[in-house]
Amino acid sequence: MFKLSGKRPSNLGVKDGKLAPVVNKPNNVSSQAAAGDALHYIAPFKFTRDAKQAMQRLAKVIQAQPRTEIVRQDDRYVYAEFSTKLMGYVDDVEFYLEPDEKLIHVRSASRLGYSDLGMNRKRVEALRAEFEKNS
């Protein structure tokens, strides 16, 4: 297997309640992008239980994915790296909990390349579907 991971971005994390902004490539999505930005905007995750349970559920959903590692996790933030099977490309995926709004913001971005053929969007939607079961 190849390993085309690239360098971990230095702009990850939450700053003033925001995840890193999207970049002008089609290989990233964010629930904090402008709602009119059809290429990059994706809806945040919603939950009905308490915030702690929601974050525990989210971590379990992430850990169940193949070739995935949670790099950082606290009460309101999760950062995970997802690697592709064949070439080992790495996508950086972040989640930020807004407990009062019962939302979890998400950002998923490829480290390398220009197009991801929609994989970041597909991954987030698959994670959302699994997370929102019984949430």
Image (spheres, rainbow, N blue to C red):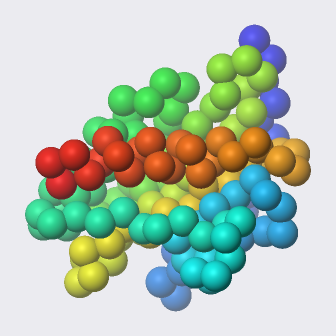
| Pick the front one: 18 or 44 | 44
Residue 132 percent coordinates (x, y) = 26, 52
Q: The C terminus appears in which quarter of the rendering?
A: bottom left
- Residue lying furthest right: 114
Whether residue 23 is situated above or below residue 8 in the rendered picture: below
**Residue at 62% from the left image edge and 77% from the top image edge:** 33
| Pick the front one: 32 or 7 | 32
- Number of marks present in the image shown: 0
Task: Confirm whether residue 22 shows in the render.
Answer: yes
Left-right relation of 50 to 87? left
Left-right relation of 65 to 4? left
- Residue lying furthest top: 1
Q: Quadrant of residue 49?
A: bottom left
Task: Confirm whether residue 7 shows in the render.
Answer: no
| Pick the front one: 106 or 122 | 122
Q: Quadrant of residue 112?
A: top right
Q: Quadrant of residue 34?
A: bottom right
**Residue at 32% from the left image edge and 72% from the top image edge:** 103
Residue 48 percent coordinates (x, y) = 15, 66
Q: The N terminus appears in which quarter of the rendering?
A: top right
**Residue at 29% from the left image edge and 66% from the top image edge:** 46
Whether residue 93 is situated above or below residue 22 in the rendered picture: above
**Residue at 41% from the left image edge and 45% from the top image edge:** 127
Residue 52 percent coordinates (x, y) = 18, 61
Left-right relation of 124 to 111? left
Whether residue 40 is situated above or below residue 57 in the rendered picture: below
